Amino acid sequence: MKKNIAIIMGGYSSEINISIKSGNVVYNHLNKEKYHSYRVLILKEKWVVLDANNNEYSIDKNDFSFILEDKKIKFDCVFNAIHGAPGENGMLLAYFNLINLKHTSAPFYQMALTFNKRDTLSVVKEYGVKTAISIYLNEGDKIDVDKIITKVGLPCFIKPNNAGSSYGISKAHTKEDIIPALEKAYKEDSEILIESFLDGPEVSVGVIQYQGETIVLPITEIVTENDFFDYEAKYEGKSEEITPARISSEEKKKIETIAKKVYSILNMSGFSRSEYILVKGEPHFLEMNTVPGLTEESILPQQAKEAGISLEELFDNAIETALG
C-alpha cells in the first residue's frame, strides 16, 4: 500500500520562496508508484494542502490531516522542506512528535540547537572543533565598537544568530561599517553573532544518513565573485560551486573526519550541510544547515549526484529512514 507523504514548504521566515522551490522539487522527484505525495504550504495565516491546480484544502491541526472528496487523509510521514522557522528551528517537529507523526529531519531539540549558531558553536568548541573568535549580542545590549574590534579584529562578519540563506549578513571592513551591519542583522533576528574573519578557502560538506550509514558526501568548494558567500552569490549566480573541491587528499581527510565528528557530537540525523573555512589547511567550522536547499542546482543535491545518488534515491532514502 502506498504511503501518504506530506511535503511541507513555505514557513514564517525570509526563506519562504526558496523553501517552496525546494518543496516542489521534492514533490516532482518522489516515486509516484511508491508514495501518494501532497504539497503542504505552511504559512502564518494558513496551513493548506495544494492540489495540482493549486486548490487549497485546510489542514486540521489536531492531527495534521485534511479532507479530500469527503475522505479524511492522514499522513504516514512528513518530508521537511521548510528553511528557517518553523521547520528548521524545531518548532513544527516538536508538534509532530506530540501527535506521533514521523518526519525526515532530526529530533526537534537537535534542530533547535543547530538553528542557533551561537549555541551550536558553544557545543562543538567543547570537543576541540576549531571555530572563529566570536561575540554575541542581544537586541538592546550596549554596543562598544572598539571592544568588538579588539576581540574579533577587522574585517569581521556580523550575522543574525537564527537565520539562513545569508539574509542579514554583512562583512565589516572598517569601524564605520559595524553599526549599519548590526542594524541590518537586527532586521532578521533579535540575536546577533559577530565573528572574526577566517582567511582561506570555503567548503561546504554534506553529511547524511544513507542506507543505514552516516556518510560524508563529496565536498564542494565555494568560489564567489562577491566579498563573501552572500545571498546574491548563493542564488543569483555570483559564485562557482566546484564539486569535488580542489583540495589536497590530506585536507579532504581532515574535513571528512571533522564533519562526521560534528554530525555525531550534535546527535544529528537526516540531512545536514555544514560550512568550513580551511585556515592553513585546518578546517574551521562555521555553521550547520539541517534543511539545505533541495533544488537540482543546490549544493547538497550536487554532492549527492557526484556520489552517484539521484534526487529520487536521496528523497526516498530520507523517507524510508524516517519510517524506520
Image (cartoon, rainbow, N blue to C red):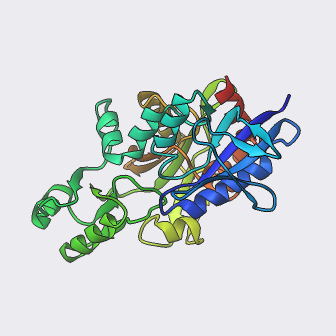
Q: Position of residue 131 (x, y in %)?
A: 32, 45
Determine the image quadrant of residue 186.
bottom left
State the residue at coordinates (53%, 30%): 97
Is residue 8 toward the left or the right of residue 36 in the image?
A: left
State the residue at coordinates (45%, 45%): 89
Determine the image quadrant of residue 214.
top right
Residue placed most toward the observer, 88 or 298: 88
Furthest residue toward right: 33
Q: Position of residue 250 (x, y in %)?
A: 50, 39
Q: Tell me if residue 253 can be seen.
A: no
Q: Tell me if residue 71 can be seen.
A: yes
Q: Position of residue 132 (x, y in %)?
A: 30, 49
Is residue 5 toward the left or the right of residue 110 in the image?
A: right
Furthest residue toward bottom: 176
Is residue 251 toward the left or the right of residue 180 in the image?
A: right
For the N terminus, which image quadrant? Answer: top right
Residue placed most toward the observer, 138 or 134: 138
Instruction: Indicate whether 109 appears above or below 141.
Output: above
Furthest residue toward front: 70
Residue placed most toward the observer, 203 or 23: 23
State the residue at coordinates (70%, 27%): 211
Q: Position of residue 184 (x, y in %)?
A: 32, 70
